[in-house]
Image (cartoon, grey):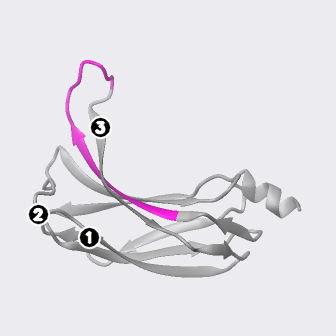
Amino acid sequence: MLEKFLSSIGIGHVKVDTVVGKASIKQGDMIKGEVIIEGGMADQPINKVQLLLLHKYEEDKEDSDFPYHEKELKTIELNDIGTIKAGEKRTISFQFPTDTNHPKTTDTNQTILRTTIDIPQAVDPTDEDSIIVS
């Protein structure tokens, strides 16, 4: 019982690491990789794993105090994951298509792949990886 409570507040919780096959791609290429999920101190049900492709860019906007902004490009959801057992390590392969006009990486433009695991009533673990697009 204590382990489940600690996991729900982020102590000893599920961890996620997304490993991308190639960190450098061309416009229109497929991003391939694996999501590695490691169970925490208690069994936890997983609603879904969400992979979100973001364009992070620098632009001065009058309505924002921040120079960097994010635009969501595509989302993939991996469902039917089930419950991750305490201490279990699970690997899920994925393929993520990019558009032929995907923004190229520059000093002011970046592509980020953000992975989030949706766990009911718990802190959702997140991982981010940079993708270089040429």
28 part of magenta stretch: no
Q: Classify residue 1 by image quadrant.
A: bottom right
- The residues bearing labels 2 and 1 have C-alpha atoms spaced at a distance of 17 Å
Q: Give the quadrant of residue 40.
A: bottom right
Q: How many marks?
A: 3
| Residue placed under numbered mark 2 in the picture | 100
Q: Is residue 108 above or below residue 87?
A: above
Amino acid type assigned to the residue bearing label 3 in the image: His
- For the residue labelled by badge 2, is the local secondary structure a helix, a strand or a loop? loop
Please tell me which of labels 3 and 1 falls first in the chain.
Answer: 1
State how far apart marks 3 and 2 are (Cα).
22 Å
Q: Amino acid at mark 2?
A: Thr
Residue 32: x and y, percent? 31, 77
Secondary structure of the residue carrying numbered label 1? loop
Q: In whole angstroms, how far apart are the C-alphas of marks 3 and 1? A: 22 Å
The part of the chain drawn in magenta is 49-65
Label drawn at residue 23: 1
Residue 100: give x, y in percent of width and height: 11, 63
User: Where 4 sits versus 109, above or below?
Assistant: below
| Disc 3: which residue | 69
Instruction: Indicate which label's residue lies in the foreground, 2 or 1.
Output: 2
Three-letter amino acid code at the position of disc 1? Ala
Q: Residues within 10 Å of mark 1 (few under 14, many from 20)?
A: some
Chain-order first, disc 2 or disc 1: 1
* Sequence-wise first label, 3 or 2: 3
Quadrant of the snapshot with the C terminus: bottom left
Q: Give coordinates of residue 57: x percent, y percent.
A: 22, 42
Q: Who's the residue at 15% across and 57% down the image?
A: 102
In the image, 77 versus 110, the foreground residue is 77
Q: Quadrant of residue 68?
A: top left
